[in-house]
Amino acid sequence: MSLPFDLPPSNPAERLRARAAAARPAGRFEPYARAPEHDGWDIPEEEHVLRTQVSVERPSRVISRNSSPDVPFDRSLNPYRGCEHGCIYCFARPSHGYLGLSAGLDFETRLIARPEAPRVLEAELRKPGYSVAPLAIGTNTDPYQPIERKMGVMRGVLEVLHAHGHPVSIVTRGAAILRDLDLLGAMAGQGLAQVGISVTTLDAGLAREMEPRAPSPPTRIRMIRELSRAGIPVRVMAAPMIPGLTDHELEAILTEARRAGAKAASMIPVRLPHEVAPLFADWMERHRPGLAEKVLGRIRDMRGGKLNDPRFGNRMKGEGEMAELLRQRFALSCKRLGFARSLPELDCTQFHLPPRKGDQLELF
């Protein structure tokens, strides 16, 4: 199969270890593209393992607002830009283009941490006129990716939210969330926290290739179990479902998650916006060449003949017979397993501004 995309070749001097992408295609905002070129000298270049680099950003605000009809929240926060999990299908990859970086290897290896996020968040919550609503975290990149164990940005954010009685909804596949069971358990006991765990496949070999630095499928099921035991409402996210590659596992994923204690479930067919489409097609050709044509064809069947359909109302569910069959299978499994349609609503009535050192106390 010949790919319908032209990706630049990878740098032969870079040895890739546990990376899903193999190239650095230029972002859609870049006027020029780069590609390695042999200099004509028969001198072998010294190979080096491509390491993760972390830069620091000091933002003036961290709460992002949105009005998309496709998501159930109007505000979100991201402690990091880029994600070392490196999931090849990740719809957030093109966001690296806003930084002048590639959605390919740069997204996985050139990360931006926001260590000032807790302080900035507290300042935003204290602004006059702030109106409370659940804050979504992990909607773009994973707040519990590997560097969180060292940086601790997410832990600081949770401490601020807990102190203010502010509700939070977290989406992750990172095992570092288990470190925060104390905070999340306390918040969940007050109706202030819920978690969504993404499980794409139960096939450990496929997961290792497709999501090279994310926790293994058994670890994610264990995360659901431990979060549930701590009293934290958990939703399993069978997302993305990739037709012809992982969709046959839908029922098994839901069953395992329910046994582990998940209370609700959701499912989204894969979507491949902008630079993600050629990266995913290249990954299929490298790792599953015999399935590439079949999988890409089925994605097109669900996306109106393209690999992505950005229209509101369609992008999260797809269209056509295959998408409808997937929805029916999901609905039947949820009914059979006793999944709730959604997790309980978070409590927005407990929000308050805790006193700070030096604040003047009220007399009455």
Image (cartoon, helix red, strand yellow):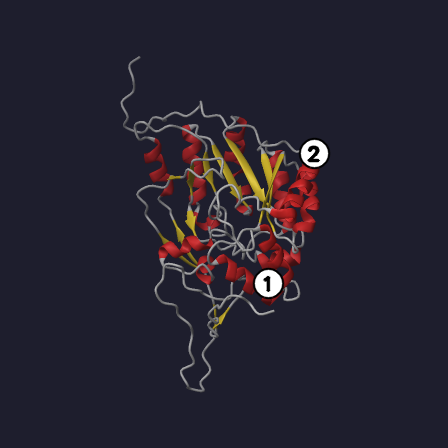
Quadrant showing the N terminus? bottom right
Above/below status of 323 relative to 93: above
Residue drawn 54% across the image and 27% down it: 189
Task: Say which residue appears at 65% left-offset and 45% top-offset.
Answer: 326
Residue 357 left/right relative to 217: left
Q: In which quarter of the image is the C terminus?
A: top left
| Residue 284: mark in rendering | 1
Disc 2 marks a residue whose amino acid type is Lys
Residue 86, placed above or below residue 237 = below
- Total labels: the figure holds 2
Residue 151, position in %: x, y? 43, 49
Labelled disc at residue 335: 2
Quadrant of the rendered image containing residue 222: top right
N-terminal of the two: label 1 or label 2?
Answer: 1
Q: Position of residue 241 (x, y in %)?
A: 61, 49
Q: Residues within 10 Å of mark 2 (few under 14, many from 20)?
A: few
Residue 8 visible in the shown view: yes
Position of residue 25 relative to residue 174, above or below, is below
Query: Relative to residue 80, is residue 298 drawn left or right?
Result: right
Q: What SS does tag 2 mark?
A: helix
Residue extending furthest right?
A: 336
6 or 194, nearer to the observer: 6
User: Residue placed at 33% from the left, 41% from the top?
Assistant: 61
Write the residue at 67% across / 54% down: 203
Q: How far apart in space, not on screen, are marks 1 and 2 (Cα)?
A: 33 Å
Q: Do the residues labelled 1 and 2 touch (CB within 8 Å)?
A: no
Q: Nearer the viewer, residue 104 or 54?
A: 104
